[in-house]
Amino acid sequence: MLTMFDSTENFLLTSLQLMSALFIFVIGLAALWAVYAYLVDSTQKTQAIRRNYPVIGRFRALFERLGEFFRQYFFAMDREELPFNRAQRNWVYRAAKDVDNTVAFGSTRNLTVPGQVIFVNCPFPTLGEDAVPSEPITIGPFARQPYTTAGLFHISGMSYGAISKPALEALASGAAEAGCWLNTGEGGLSPYHLESGADLVFQIGTAKYGVRDAAGNLSDERLQAVAAHAQVRMFEIKLSQGAKPGKGGILPAAKITPEIAEIRGIPVGVDSISPNRHPDVGNTGELLDLIERVRRVTGKPVGFKVVLGAYGWLDELLGMVHARGVASAPDFITVDSADGGTGAAPMPLMDDMGLPLRVSLPMLVDKLTEYGLRERIRVVASGKLITPADVAWALCIGADFITSARGFMFALGCIQALQCNKNTCPTGITTHQRKFQRGLHVPTKAVRVAAYVQNLSKEVGIIAHACGVRSPRELRRFHAHLVQADGRTIGLDQFYPESERQIVAALSWPRDQIEVVHASEHRSRPSPLEPLRESSLEPRIAARKSAPSLHAPVE
Ligand SMILES: Cc1cc2nc3c(=O)[nH]c(=O)nc-3n(C[C@H](O)[C@H](O)[C@H](O)COP(=O)(O)O)c2cc1C
């Protein structure tokens, strides 16, 4: 009779035999595969590496791909990576999670690198009780419905299509909570923009998605329908964006769902490529005509987004505004940096075209001053402005508002996997695959979006107070220095001396009167900002979604 010990021994022996048989089988299979791969590699004619190094040459592509991830986690220093380094990303992650964002021991930033910006502190910083919230600013005093907001920091255009539904919902709800605007990007207006209740800037891209007729031309009826949504506060005509000046939007076919195709009015399964400029805007006069038309039809402020390039164009534009009258001016200009982000762009345009913001922002602000239009045309700056110091720099130079796209992607959990064009974003932000979208929990991320805006605005305030002014919009060029090649610093006011020539007389306009009559209620949150909680946001998101008026057809 078999004892229990014998049966256990038998079981173990049989298992061992099975496992060794399996092991030999797997090794045999691998050897067979290696022989097969060797024959294929050494006879194929398309890849030199595989032909010269059969079998092992195959691992090169795998290692190159894995390197992207390993570098980020193991090898890259905190301040090393591009487009955004770990220190920048971590600041945003922590601000968005609303956790302690202080650092210990000492700065890891090398303060001798030429081009670094250093703020210059005042011997007598502003006391907490003397600090004041930023003044509200009115955009579009000549529009029937100007827009007034105190917010400094807003969400830059990212179309529904380039980003996913849950990403858009989280951004929109976060924007509503934080009281900042959300730019639709060029992909039209979706129900997910509207259900949030956030202030929206509707972007008119070169394909005019969402506001075009059957022939692809701008339709006044559709413009009116979009403008009829009270939430749509302004219209932005996109001339160009930093990552691809001279190229229209690109939405790869893999990312075009039937819903996105319907919102844009395009076919499914074909890359959606917008023209590389507005077909109806071939010169400065036609741009001012279009701005005037959109403002007349919608009654709302209208501006344009541009990457500055060719010198001289701003003189032509602002000179023409002088000739036509102050009311003809764009209500705002969004100046995007050449190193801006995108869902997809050709590399030569992304790397080598257009002026970076450190050149174009002072240029724009100075030209507006020269032409006496500094208060008439508001300046929105975008391009890698994702931390408090970046935003404070732009305010020093003269920006009225700052917008960011990728800062908000980090707030949503982006890990800079650089796959926005592949529909495989591992964090669900730029993919329409549900398996990846699952990880993006809308109420949690909406709270993070709002917390990012709040904490960033708070820390820009800290910089302003250390410089001795009462609010961020009082920052001026002399509040910051630039590190030069010899290690010495120079004030931004000397490096970018502000323009003194001014042609104001012809363009005076009754600012106060217009603002008081038309100013819409501004939506900035009270300060100090009440803490946001996911649990408090979830019912509010649900309530907004079920409000019937918000689901009105959008096109
Ligand atoms: C995924 C993605 C989609 C974008 N889509 C648009 C768009 O539709 N229209 C546009 O004008 N800019 C678009 N942009 C550019 C951003 O609005 C912004 O100008 C640029 O990324 C610079 O800001 P950032 O450095 O804060 O990202 C997109 C950027 C990203 C990353």
Image (tube, rainbow, N blue to C red):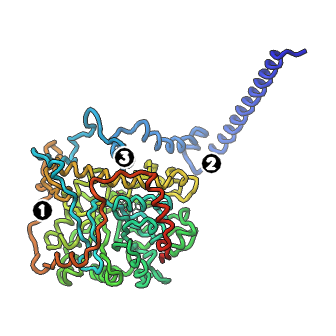
Query: Of circles 3 and 2, which is in front?
Result: 3
Give residue 161's position: percent from left, percent from top: 49, 64
**Residue linked to disc 1:** 498
Position of 397 with respect to 280 (left or right) is left
Depth check: give the residue in front, 242 or 59. 242
Q: Tell me the element at label 2.
A: loop
Left or right of 142, for residue 256:
right
Say whether disc 1 or disc 2 marks the residue closer to the N-terminus. 2
Q: Earlier in the sequence, mark 3 or mark 2?
A: 2
Which amino acid, mark 2?
Answer: Gln
- Ligand 1 resides in the quarter of the picture at bottom left
Front label number (3 vs 1): 3
Q: Which mark is residue 44?
A: 2
Is 555 drawn above or below residue 34 in the view shown? below
Q: Secondary structure at mark 1?
A: loop
Q: Which of the numbered marks, if any, corresponds to residue 98? A: 3
